[in-house]
Amino acid sequence: MFSLDREFLMLKMASYKLTYFNVTALGEPIRFLLSYLGREFEDYRLSQDQWPSTKPKTPFGKLPVLEIDGKALHQSTSIARYLGKEADLAGSDNWEALQIDMAVDSLHDFRLALVGYFFEQDKAVKEKKRGPLLKDTVPFYLTKFDELVKDNDGYLANGKLSWGDLYFVACSSLINHIIEFDMFDKYENLRTLRDNVHSIPQIKAWVETRPKTPF
Amino acid sequence: MFSLDREFLMLKMASYKLTYFNVTALGEPIRFLLSYLGREFEDYRLSQDQWPSTKPKTPFGKLPVLEIDGKALHQSTSIARYLGKEADLAGSDNWEALQIDMAVDSLHDFRLALVGYFFEQDKAVKEKKRGPLLKDTVPFYLTKFDELVKDNDGYLANGKLSWGDLYFVACSSLINHIIEFDMFDKYENLRTLRDNVHSIPQIKAWVETRPKTPF
């Protein structure tokens, strides 16, 4: 079993450096998955004034970037799916993997609608977006996700834990911040999902000790 | 080899119905992949006035939807990755799959910047977005993709054909329409990528016979 031992040793010895801002948002799913996997990682949090000089050094001008042994990876979903496979949390066949991917891509549609409002610079435009967002978009998506979790025994897909669940719960701090209420108070199946993820010992430990940030 | 024959027969007999609008855009990567796989599919193209009554019947209020034997799948990237796996175009290990995913997710960042401009209803806002988009965003992304293809021997990732390449070329009609020039005239490595994809006999046949649409 020399090669397996060697692989194990290499995995344990790989160095991980996550570069992101001092918020949860798109960095947090990677922090959740690295914690789940028990990998130590440098959790490097940029200040806003470091961003202009850092941006040109990233693969596509965006964060988060995860360096594994110095190799720079980007795109939070791609990275989370990759780590999810390493953690055996990516479904047991192509069909199951697809169910996870569909849920996560729908979460991104929701997130994009939210951040399109949240980061809107023009106050009049922002106010105009607010009504339809809170009245239509937010209940539409949260109800859909709640039903999905109900149909999947407390998870987003396949009736079992996946990287998609970690992704969703990690992103929920940002979503709750933008919608200005706690989705887990209102949607009981989403609360079950959150509790299922937060009860994983490695996630529990991470959430208890992570830096406190506004979102 | 009875079970293999049986699986083959079932695959051939599965029914595929794609529901999308009468454009390429996010439906086209699925059309490319189904064509690549040699699967016959119903290419159902909605008119705009059918959309309000169809929208509530979709899984998350969006198109495209692909029904496989009546099971409704959504999210074009999730579906394309799934079909890409079926077609053995999804990389030979997790690391290779990650390289494809990163390229496709970056394409979506680019596409979202483009459609955010293209579908802007407020004429003044649209005009304001136009300058930075064409001057900065478009050359930034097209140069990045061109370099990526140069580094990968005519493909987006891993030096070989993947579903990401089909996705990119299928989406390029929309992108060219929005940027108002042909990216393949200006970026020689992207031209190589396009030619590599278009020279696949099944793709060539599809592109030659598909409905002609503005984009």
Image (cartoon, coloured by chain):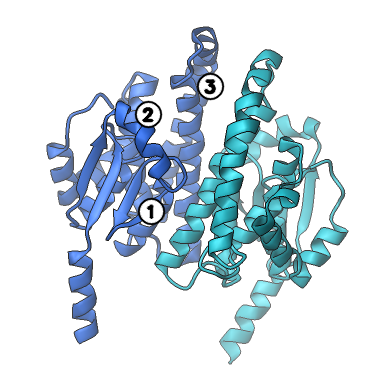
Chain colours: A blue, B cyan
Q: Answer left or right for B61 relative to A148.
A: right
Could you say which disc has been placed on residue A136 in the image?
3
Mark 1 → mark 2, Cα distance in angstroms: 25 Å
Could you say which disc has been placed on residue A208 in the image?
none
Q: Answer left or right for A123 relative to A211.
A: right
The residue under label 1 is which amino acid type? Answer: Leu
Q: Tell me if mark 1 has few (under 14), some (14-19) or many (20+) residues whose alpha carbon lies within 10 angstroms of its own.
A: many
Circle 2 — which element? helix
Mark 3 → mark 2, Cα distance in angstroms: 15 Å
User: Are the residues under badges 3 and 2 in a single subunit?
Assistant: yes
Q: Answer left or right for B95 relative to B172.
A: left
Contact, CB < 8 Å: mark 3 with mark 2?
A: no
Mark 3 → mark 1, Cα distance in angstroms: 36 Å
Label 1 lies in what chain?
A: A
How many numbered badges does the structure rendering display?
3
The residue at 54%/57% (across/down) is B148
Label 2 lies in what chain?
A: A
Residue ID for mark 1? A73
Q: Residue A61: percent from the left, percent from the top?
A: 45, 40
Residue A132, quarter of the rendered image: top right
- If you read the primary sequence from the N terminus, does the residue marked by circle 1 or circle 2 appear first? 1
Where the C terminus of chain B falls, by quadrant? top right
Could you say which disc has been placed on residue A175 in the image?
2
**Front residue (pair A126, A64):** A64
**Front residue (pair B28, B43):** B28
Circle 1 — which element? strand
- If you read the primary sequence from the N terminus, does the residue marked by circle 3 or circle 2 appear first? 3
Q: Residue A32: percent from the left, percent from the top?
A: 26, 47
